């Protein structure tokens, strides 16, 4: 009798049991050979950071204040009143940071631009010295064969913009800024993301007050702010296209809520997909469909956003890729409700990483990709962030043994491999983060880096997870 191929072997328990009964010897790997999960050739391995979290240099060379400077300097808003005034001082140490990346072997770096460094008042007069910093960083990356992926807005809104995201004019100012910067950088940068994580700079900033500007407005006001945010994205896409060479890839980085089917059966899979569409209605769904789902508008009723002629068309401007920031799952199941799904409450015993919100469930990275691709068929998708905090301790020997971070990353990359293998167009993975940095309201109390940063001396030390990621990149595989 013929040996089963490894593929047939994979077909399941029934085949295996049948083969065992028939006394068939199954092919095995040679001793010492390992069954690694290889990624495709050309898969992009990278790291991510954001301007306010790493740069410091808050007042250098004419940078204007952002709402995060104001918020962090307001007593009681961040952990121990910590601010991004100095952070990792990447403003001065960027060459060292590029060498950290080079040592890891990453081929790409996702960074963001501080709007108020480039246009201190948010609108009007640019500050060439601010732009020069980004020219230097980009040239240094390219000289080291690292491809920059640039986010234009990662929450640090210029303080001077009247009314912030409450003001519709901010969307237009963003588009002007996006057009200006991409025109200057577009000769060397070919991948731009407009905004990072709508919900964080709208709801968390204006509805729940946890993030800058720290307001607690009403649902209706918040819906309008969300609308201005996605409008900024859409007008931004148009401005970038108008100012960059054809072929420039434009997308966004979004932390769409990831719904995982409780059990992988057709009805629960469909429920998770439907939940993805409705659960992200004001953000990614509106962007990908150029329309708010009726369910959302009906649900919000009088609180629904006021939409002007042409807004939805701009919002739905085609993107070249979706960037997905994926950290945590939510579980969905099919039910008899009109919407056809229910979201499971998380039991109090559900495990999490060092940050309480970082609940485990590494299959979220697979379902995040699959739901988005099945719903909207983007041409390309990147994991623009994934990573974890850990209670890292630098030993006297100068080591950080962050085995919990390695566990988290290994599990996620194992599940991401499934998406790649099934043919979803996953082009790359950006690990959050290159180094410990200013973790917003958590200040410096939550470390997400592959490199430990001593925030007094600014010395960077690779953690065990950096060695681990370097090995993944070298093998282009997860073991
Ligand atoms: C991303 O946000 C950000 O893009 C990045 O800047 C950040 O450093 C990184 O992840 C790690 O957090 O304290 O329970 O109120 C991830 C989404 C939204 C997760 C805000 C934490 C606060 C939850 N974040 N959320 S809680």
Image (cartoon, rainbow, N blue to C red):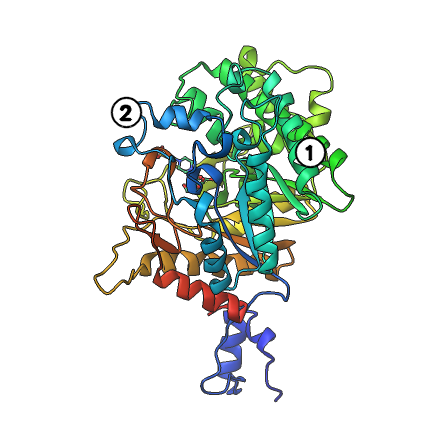
Residue extending farthest to the right is 246
Residue drawn at (41%, 61%) of the image: 466
Disc 1 to disc 2: CB gap under 8 Å: no
Name the spot of residue 235 as percent of width and height, x first. 68, 27
Seen from the viewer's position, the closer of residues 220 and 154 is: 154
Name the spot of residue 85 as percent of width and height, x first. 38, 35
Mark closer to the chain start, 1 or 2: 2
Q: CA distance from mark 1 to mark 2?
A: 36 Å
Residue extending farthest to the left is 396
For disc 1, the neighbor class at 10 Å (few under 14, some 14 to 19, many from 20) is many
**Secondary element type, mark 1:** helix
Residue drawn at (58%, 30%) of the image: 127
Tell me, yes or no, if residue 274 can be seen here.
no
Q: Which mark is residue 237?
A: 1
Q: Which mark is residue 76?
A: 2
Using residue 146 as the reference point, say whether residue 58 is left or right of it: left
- Regarding ligand 1, which quadrant of the image does it lie in? top left
The quarter of the picture where the N terminus appears is bottom right
């Amino acid at each position: 009798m013929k040996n089963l191929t490894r593929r047939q072997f994979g077909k399941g328990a029934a085949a295996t049991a049948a083969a065992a009964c028939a006394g068939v010897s199954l092919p095995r790997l040679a001793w010492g050979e390992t069954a690694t999960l290889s990624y495709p050739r050309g898969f992009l391995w990278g790291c991510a950071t954001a301007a306010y979290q790493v740069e410091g240099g808050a007042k250098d060379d004419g940078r204007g204040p952002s709402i995060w400077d104001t918020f962090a300097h307001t007593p009681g808003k961040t952990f121990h009143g910590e601010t991004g005034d100095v952070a990792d001082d990447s403003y001065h140490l960027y060459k060292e940071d590029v060498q950290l990346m080079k040592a890891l072997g990453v081929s790409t770096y996702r960074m963001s631009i501080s709007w108020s460094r480039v246009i201190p008042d948010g609108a009007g007069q640019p500050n060439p010295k601010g732009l020069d910093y980004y020219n230097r960083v980009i040239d240094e990356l390219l000289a080291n064969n690292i491809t920059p992926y640039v986010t234009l807005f990662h929450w640090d809104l210029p303080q001077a913009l009247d009314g912030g995201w409450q003001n519709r004019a901010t969307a237009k100012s963003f588009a002007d800024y996006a057009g200006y910067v991409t025109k200057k950088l577009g000769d060397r940068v070919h991948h731009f993301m407009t905004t990072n994580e709508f919900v964080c700079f709208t709801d968390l900033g204006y509805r729940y007050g946890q993030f800058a500007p720290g307001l607690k407005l009403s649902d209706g006001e918040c819906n309008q702010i969300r609308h201005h945010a996605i409008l900024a994205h859409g007008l931004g896409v148009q401005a970038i296209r108008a100012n960059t060479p054809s072929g420039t890839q434009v997308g966004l980085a979004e932390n769409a809520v990831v719904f995982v089917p409780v059990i992988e059966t057709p009805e629960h899979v469909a429920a998770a997909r439907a939940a993805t569409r409705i659960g992200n209605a004001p953000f990614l769904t509106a962007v990908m469909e150029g329309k708010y789902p009726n369910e959302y508008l009906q649900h919000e009723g009088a609180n629904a956003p006021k939409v002007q002629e042409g807004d939805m068309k701009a919002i739905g401007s085609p993107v070249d890729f979706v960037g997905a920031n994926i950290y945590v799952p939510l579980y969905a199941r099919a039910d008899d409700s009109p919407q056809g799904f229910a979201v499971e409450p998380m039991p109090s015993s559900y495990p999490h990483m060092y940050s309480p919100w970082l609940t485990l469930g590494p299959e979220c990275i697979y379902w995040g990709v699959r739901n988005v691709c099945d719903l909207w068929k983007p041409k390309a998708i990147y994991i623009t962030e994934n990573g974890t905090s850990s209670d890292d301790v630098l030993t006297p020997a100068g080591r950080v043994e962050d085995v919990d971070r390695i566990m988290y990353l290994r599990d996620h990359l194992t599940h991401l491999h499934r998406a790649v293998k099934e043919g979803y167009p996953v082009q790359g993975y950006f690990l959050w983060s290159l180094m410990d940095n200013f973790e917003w309201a958590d200040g410096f109390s939550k470390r997400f880096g592959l490199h430990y940063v001593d925030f007094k001396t600014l010395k960077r030390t690779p953690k065990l997870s950096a060695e681990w990621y370097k090995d993944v990149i070298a093998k282009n595989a997860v073991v």
